[in-house]
Image: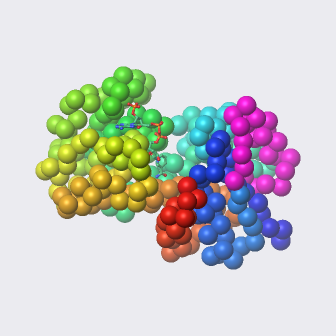
Amino acid sequence: LLPKLAGVCGWPIHHSLSPVIHNYWLKESGLSGAYIPFVVRPDEAKRAFQSLKQTSISGVNVTLPLKREAFLAADECTPEAKKLGVANCLYKRDGKLIGHNTDLEGFTRPLLKHFDAKRLAHSSVLLVGAGGAAKAVIGALLSLNVPEIRVVNRTDEKAEKLVESLNLPSVVFTPWSDKQNYVVPSDILVNATSAGMAGYPALDISLTGMNKDSLVYDLIYTPRVTPLLKDAQKQGCKTLGGLEMLIAQARPSFRLFFGETASPDSDPSEVLYSALKSGIR
Ligand code: NDP
């Protein structure tokens, strides 16, 4: 069998941790193949994606700012990609280029380890952020039938616009100034902002009153334990960091590109952290 080749496209791309994850799984599973970063400038993206079918590359992941272009370049898109209108994964099937989005699965899998589907269907979520990641979070929470999703964002208008575009009774706009009033009645707090990331200020929110039954899910993965997660641990809440989502969103792509599932016991977290420490990112 010929070695399979896959990769990740973006602009810039040097920061991507995807090669670390996929090459770790390739090594662990003994499969013959490679996963490499491709520099693709936005003005070259359409041509690059369309030419994928003429290459021996099995598929590519796509990062910012090319996800919409990937969606548009695909011959067909999966329901997950259609839900978000962007694709973070392009793969080939029966001569066609398929656009897929693995962020929904990436967010959901780790969440289900803490809150089962039955409990989620009776839970309320306070979601901080209104960017691309927040959209994926809302899509995932809606698929899980979460009945109350409050969206707050530093820039109120962005959250308001996002909520209005969905026009669903379960997704509610909450002004930034009012967010503290919804921390305690919420079962889950999700941080889908850049606040708390290395080099950014911490998220301006107090978790006082949250308890062991609440979950704080921070999408950020550098640092591994953000100021928000530290506060949550002090409060005794359950916590989830962004690294688990990052790994979970890579799993379906690995299966699509290399034809095998990475073992659930094969955990690249430590390799990822040494890569981060050694300055790959
Ligand atoms: P976007 O640029 O689309 O959105 C950024 C969001 O962060 C906006 O809502 C913005 O608010 C908010 N924000 C930025 N700085 C602050 C601050 N100081 N205080 C409060 N809010 C702030 O980014 P994404 O949605 O793509 O990503 C958001 C975060 O999620 C990033 O940290 C990213 O690393 C992480 N992420 C993690 C993933 C994973 O797999 N773990 C996957 C995807 C994203 P405003 O509108 O006011 O500017």
| Residue at screen point 39% across, 26% down | 158
Question: Left of 155 or right of it: where is 18?
Answer: right
Q: Colour scheme used in the picture?
A: rainbow
Residue 52 visible:
yes
Q: Quadrant of the N terminus?
A: bottom right
Q: Position of residue 77 (x, y in %)?
A: 65, 40
| Residue at screen point 69% across, 77% down | 30
Q: Quadrant of residue 58?
A: bottom right
What span is in magenta? 37-60
Question: Left of 16 or right of it: where is 131?
Answer: left
Ligand 1 position by quadrant: top left
Does 5 appear above or below 203? below
Residue 264 visible:
no
Q: Position of residue 211 (x, y in %)?
A: 17, 57
Does 76 lie within the magenta span?
A: no
| Residue at screen point 61% across, 63% down | 20
Q: Position of residue 222 (x, y in %)?
A: 44, 55
Does 224 appear above or below 47? below
Looking at the image, the residue that sits furthest to the left is: 209
Does 45 lie within the magenta span?
A: yes
Q: Quadrant of the C terminus?
A: bottom right
Q: Position of residue 231 (x, y in %)?
A: 23, 55
Of residues 52 and 143, the one nearer the viewer is 52
Of residues 99 and 12, the one nearer the viewer is 12
Of residues 198 and 23, the one nearer the viewer is 198
